[in-house]
Amino acid sequence: MRGCLRKLGIFIGVLTVLVAVFALVFWLNWKRERQLTEQARNAYKNGNAVEALAYYQKLTDRHSLTEAQAREARDRADELELYLDASSLQEEGQTEGAIAAYEKYLDEHFNLEWRGNIYGYRAREALAILKPQQAQKLHEHGDYAEAVGVYMSLLEIKMLEIDGCKLHATWDVEETACQDAEAAIEQNQLAAQEAIPALILEWTDAIEQQGNYQEFADHCERILLENPEMLSNKELKSRIAQVYNDWAVSLRQAESYNAAIEVYETILRSYSETPTGQLAKAALDDTHAALDIWLQENPAIPVVEFSEELSRDYEDVWVLTTVFKEIGGKVGYELSGSGWIIDADGQYYGRWGLGSVGRGPVTVPAGGETESIYRLTGDSFVDGYAVFTWEGEDEGGHLITIEERVHLLP
């Protein structure tokens, strides 16, 4: 009995020691995690990205974190890695790569509508500095459209509107980062607003040699829509109107009269007060007259494509697909069709046995194509025909007749 009691005492003693050791290890581990978390958060808040990342990476390797702690460590580590990648690219002078990386960082980890942080402000400051550099390089290479696009994207960078940089006034480092970003954005946006009109003026001169009128017009429409105040610059407005006029003249010379008419109408709508705009009405009338003459002399060249033999699909339906094209390239046309469905014995049936079948109408744009689909069912039509006559005219009033005959197979 005494031996049993002694053994029980030893067991309890060992168990007590093990529990104490386990508790000590658990407490030390908890203390270490709490210390790492505190160090990581302090480094993060103070803007020490490299140090904060090191702490968060250590935390992600520990397996005793709560779900919330583990998620915080992973999210912060991912955020800081992306931010530091962008910062590294900037230091290496890789402007385009740095811009793309900073924009990705902001898109994934920074939302000014509900929060801000020091790295988001620094990223915005970096973009405000890098984008003018990128635009200048594009300008030097004659890539005016891309350069203007970069300046426009710079104007879209925003900062906190509610409470401004005082939102987190208790964090001096963050408030300083916010103020630095705000100053850089304001300064470079003002420079961009001055650069864009000057760049457009220079671009208009290049258009005379390059002839990329459509590209120029597309970008100008967007620029002026977002910055209508630029139209107060009379020199810029007059020069843009002249480019549009040059475009219209080139279209007339290429006998693209409809396109030229659209350009002249744009001049009258948006630039009527310029010297070019005052002459546009007469030019528009002359273009309409030239178009009327041209349409009379140049009929459309219609082409029709269809299957002369057609089997039913898996639903026992004949799907008649008729494709109309205009290969002339400059004159469109309109057609309507009517006809009959004929069975194997030669009996004529319209839709549901009620008479002639109608198709269309279809409108074929100049140089384009249009598709017309008709579905037909009924076992009595096997080995019969679908016969249609399409009639209409082109823009010049020239009559067009096309026949379609399809053999209906099982």
Image: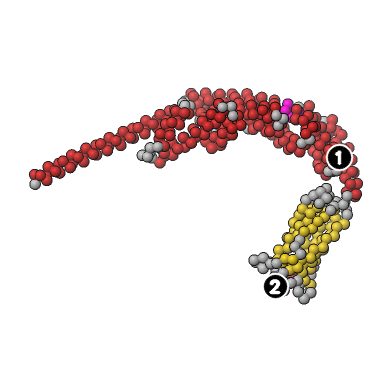
Identified by mark 1, the residue type is Gln
Residue 81, how many percent across, how many down? 49, 33
Q: For the point 84% across and 32% down, which residue is it?
A: 276
Quarter of the image with the C terminus is bottom right
Q: Which of 369 and 269 is in front in this view?
A: 369
Marking on residue 253: 1
Image: magenta residue range: 196-201
Q: Is the magenta stretch mostly helix, strand or loop?
A: helix
Q: For the point 78% across and 29% down, which residue is it?
A: 205
Q: Which of 163 and 74 is in front in this view?
A: 74
Per the image, is 199 magenta? Answer: yes
Identified by mark 2, the residue type is Asp
In this view, 5 is above or below 141 = below
Mark 2 secondary-structure assignment: helix
Q: Residue furthest bottom?
A: 345
- Residue hosting label 2: 379
Q: For the point 82% across and 55% down, which residue is it?
A: 302
